[in-house]
Image (tube, rainbow, N blue to C red):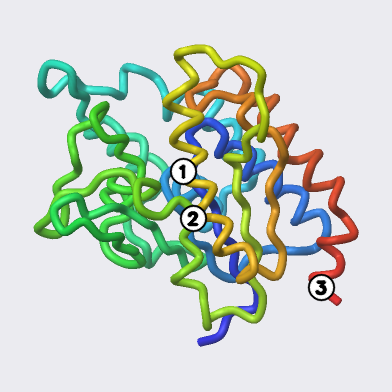
Amino acid sequence: MRYKIGIVLSGGGARGIAHLGILKALEEFGITPSVISGTSAGAIAGAFYSIGFSVEEILTIIKKGHFFSFSNLLIEKPGFFSMKGFEKIYSKYFSTNSFSDLHIPLYVAATDILKGEIVYFSSGDLSQSLMASSCIPVVFQPISYNGSMFVDGGIINNFPIEPLLGQCEKIIGIHVNSIKKEVHEIHINDIIDRSFHLALSNSVRNKIDKCNLYIEPPNMSQFGILDLKRIQEIFDYGYNYGLSIENEIKELTQ
């Protein structure tokens, strides 16, 4: 089957909320995806969007704290959290917890930490796949699923365009981890985050030419990956940037 429009949604923690703003802008220009591929926050946004929640409904769910409340983080071992609490969240919104319920096909990227390779889930247990894709190493215990152990898909592939190649007439890539190229000073707490995203940016650059439209809101590093007090601001930033590239978006449909 050949899809009309495929959309890639990068990981990015709280920055992933910008995906929702951009998806909203795309809708207003008459563009909705036929298939989605996502990593981590992008996979979560993609799952809720694929099952039929509106952008506004997804934003409301996030604002209520259903995802990021520490009450959903279960201490399994000293220094580690378990993601089991997130199963309750997903069971509330995904009635049968299956990819087959999604109205838009979805690929979820996760890192198989035992085999050292990327895996793309597109069938089976939806909540396990999403938890595997967003399982931040060291913070969370790896997710045991399908006979292996998984951590955040962004470790190997934070921009999972590969499942869409050869399947779509056109591909839109959305990357929410742009950083300032030059900074005059940096706080010690930001060094790990900046180093991580500098490394990721090189792998993404090699994939831009494979997108018919590549969307990267500038200076996303102004938002921390756990910057949950700025949910509306991140959404608005993505939405307004989406509106600002109207000409590029409309060219896609011509």
Whether the residues at callouts 1 and 2 have beta carbons within 8 Å, the answer is yes
Q: For mark 2, what is the residue?
A: 203
- Quick one: label 2, few (<14), some, or many (20+) residues within 10 Å? some
Q: What quarter of the picture does the C terminus occupy?
A: bottom right
86 lies above or below 98: above
Q: At which x and y percent is residue 124?
A: 27, 63
Label 3 or label 2, whichever comes before in sequence order: 2
Q: Nearer the viewer, mark 3 or mark 2?
A: 2
Q: Secondary structure at mark 1?
A: helix
Residue occupying image coordinates x 66% and y 18%: 184
Apparent side of residue 174 relative to residue 114 in the rendered image (left or right): right
Q: Nearer the viewer, residue 210 or 168?
A: 210
Residue occupying image coordinates x 62% and y 20%: 230
Q: Nearer the viewer, mark 3 or mark 1?
A: 1
68 lies above or below 22: above
Amino acid bearing label 3: Thr
Label 3 or label 1, whichever comes before in sequence order: 1
